[in-house]
Image (cartoon, helix red, strand yellow):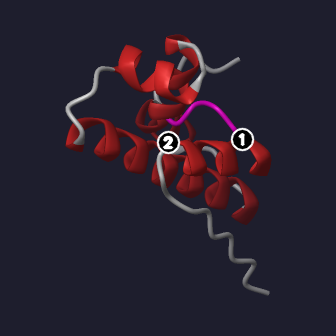
Amino acid sequence: MSKAKDIFDLISELRDEPLSKAQNLILDIRADIAGKLLAYREGHNLTQEELAEKLGISHELLDGIEAGMVSLSIEELADIAVKLGGSLKIELEI
């Protein structure tokens, strides 16, 4: 089991282990989501507790999302986007 506290610890921990393309893609997506939520929260001068309340989720879950350690479903991502007045765009490049 991983001892990583956030996405950066996880990447560092996995650096010596070969990652599949899918694993790298997942890490990139988690980091992107984490960064966007953190930027939103800081841009609106919100605490984690305040943003969590706005989203209807626990502070602990938001902490995990911002750390890049939580995988969210498409439904959960869409719900977050709507609650923050945004949209969700998913591209499958094949």
Q: Judge whether residue 72 is colored magenta.
A: yes
Which sits in the foreground, 56 or 13? 56
Give, as a single range, the part of the protein colored magenta. 68-73
The mark found on residue 11 in the picture is 2
Q: 11 or 72: which is nearer to us?
A: 72
Residue at the image position 48 percent from the left and 36 percent from the top:
7
Question: Which three-letter amino acid code belongs to the residue tagged 1?
Answer: Glu
Q: Residues within 10 Å of mark 2 (few under 14, many from 20)?
A: some
Looking at the rendering, in which quadrant would you find the C terminus? bottom right
Q: In this view, does 91 lie above or below 68?
A: below
* Residue positioned 66% across, 53% down in the render: 26
The image shows residue 11, relative to residue 19, as above or below, that is above
Q: What element carries label 2?
A: helix
Disc 1 is placed on an element classified as: helix
Task: Please name the residue that numbered disc 1 is placed on.
Answer: 76
**Residue 56 higher or lower than 41, as above or below:** above
Q: Which residue is drawn at 48% across and 22% down?
A: 52
- Residue 48: image location, x then y, percent: 37, 20
Magenta highlight on residue 32: no
Q: Mark yes or no: residue 83 visible.
A: yes
Residue 39 relative to residue 49: left or right: left
